[in-house]
Image: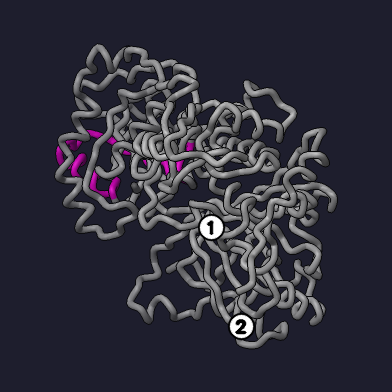
Amino acid sequence: MPAQKSTDTYEVLSPWAEADPVLLKGLAPRLDNLDGKKIGLLCNNKRAAPLILDAAEKLLKKKFPTAKFSRFFARSFSVSSLEKDREAEFNTWLKEVDAVIASVGD
Amino acid sequence: MYDAIYIEGKGKPTATFVFEHFANDAMSAASSKGMPVIRIVPEAIVSESTVVKDINTAVKAVFNDVVGVLTKPLTANEKSPKSREPENPPRIIFKGTLAEVNRFFYQRGWTDGLPIIPPTEAAVKEMMTGTDFPADHLVEKLEPRLGKATIEKIAVNAIMAGCLPTCMPLLIAGVHMLASNPVCGMMAASTGSFAPFWLINGPIAKDINIRSTYGATSPGDIANASFGRAMGLITKNIRGIRKQVEDMGVLGNPGKYTWVAAENEENSPWEPLHVERGFKKEDSTVSLMFPQSFQQMMPFGTDDKGILATIVGSVVPARQGFFAVLLTPNNAKSIADGGWSKKAVKEYIIKNAIVPDDYYSRLGMKTDKPFDRGDVTGPGIGPKLFRPSKRDPDPVQVFVFGGFGSWMGLLQGGPSPMTKKVELPKNWAQLVKKYKNIVPNYARY
């Protein structure tokens, strides 16, 4: 191989991968308020997650005394990605709540 | 964030608490899943904190934000986000001197901080002689960015890392493995700084000079050095997992530069890993795991009893996830000479690796609240450090590599190993002949 001089130039290819445009999705409609609503508390398996939800539930109960709460405990970091065997159980739980507060422990 | 996106998609408003340092990571995840307008609640709770007082204070500080995320009316863009073209740079991206190319790539965030080999058209063409697939063949789309890992893109990153074309079959298998399990992306991005450890079995190891003996995982061998490095660049440039943007590893891990070894099959008394996992001995395979830590110990004694006691005595109570014992050939032989199969070694470790009953209470820790994430051990879990489960029925692995010596090692953390067969191109024999003799020749002094 011939020796390269420091002034030799290289025309180089990009290492950054192409990606297709992702179909964008909007957010779900918001609630008017939380009074009387059933709030789902989604907790993943990181240990800060339930502690964060404990604190949030306490404050919510104080401010919205008619709100109800229901918890779902993931066994992993993400129930929708990693716990396909629980999809039906998770969807049933989702149907029963009006909104979700999630804590992922990070 | 994936759960929040899923739930929003089901029509339920969602508020997710996210540590404020992780907001970029959360939004990259949301964008990759098509919901860049997701609402999060940044807060000041350090990842994995268990200090209730701090958590209560931090949640109180953002309580109004939680309510707002769930009740504040949506903007037009939140209802129907404007589409955004992903960044797709031109194929030929730059022209310059070696120093200029390196500076350009570094400043774009495309390197691991070390200098790279310029991926020129000619170099890419040579690299792609290592596969039968055409340049535009799509091997996988890699999450979270869903970047297209085409043969050409893999080759570009391989050149940057210093690979020889004979590395291509391993890289293609490696890319398939990254796509095969969503946990791989989580490991690369995790606060736990899990580093991919690639263990190679079968004839390819000798074909391309992957070191299995002295210093197997130390610098100095082109295949060990460049394969892992290329997979790191692929993680960055194709997956889109970049440090402190998506990769939120707290301490970091030097294994992320490269961490590759071949099993020392010819000097092991036991069946190699790939045979243990159902492959033929003549198959070439790559196994992937994501340990956080690597610990080396001098055994209490170099007979079977001394080595096994050292393993059991060195398992830390706060460990979690994958666990492997690294034995040199002579350590493995000592154990095997005592009548131990690999399976028996595993069973011995599972049975005997325990913490004393009063371990946690003596340290002032309450044991009424179990801390158990999968195979995590800790207060309230019981004395056993390993518990075979549905999730991980084989929680202890035994690998044999390295030179002849008494030091031994442990790898810990991450999911169970995955193993994939490496498919070789038709011209493999010619390729091996062309590149196999590229080895260091150290002069005596």
Q: How is the image coloured?
A: one colour
The region drawn magenta spans: A52-79
Q: Are marks 2 and 1 in contact (CB under 8 Å)?
A: no
Q: Nearer the viewer, residue B7 or B405?
A: B405
For residue B244, what is the image quadrant?
Answer: top left
Q: Which mark is residue B291?
A: 1
Residue at 52 percent of width and 70 percent of height: B295
For residue A84, what is the image quadrant?
Answer: top right
* Quadrant containing the C terminus of chain B in the rendered view: bottom right
Q: Residues within 10 Å of mark 1 (few under 14, many from 20)?
A: many
Disc nearer the start of the sequence (2/1): 1
Q: Position of residue B114 (x, y in %)?
A: 44, 48
Image position of B208 with respect to A22: above or below: below
Distance from label 2 to label 1 (Cα)? 22 Å
Chain letter behind tag 1: B
Q: Residues within 10 Å of mark 2 (few under 14, many from 20)?
A: many
Residue at 57 percent of width and 26 percent of height: B121
- Element at label 1: loop
Q: Position of residue A23 (x, y in %)?
A: 44, 15
Kind of residue indicated by mark 2: Pro
Chain letter behind tag 2: B
Residue at 64 percent of width and 72 percent of height: B444
Q: Nearer the viewer, residue B285 or B44?
A: B285
Query: What residue does disc 2 label?
Result: B299
- Element at label 2: loop
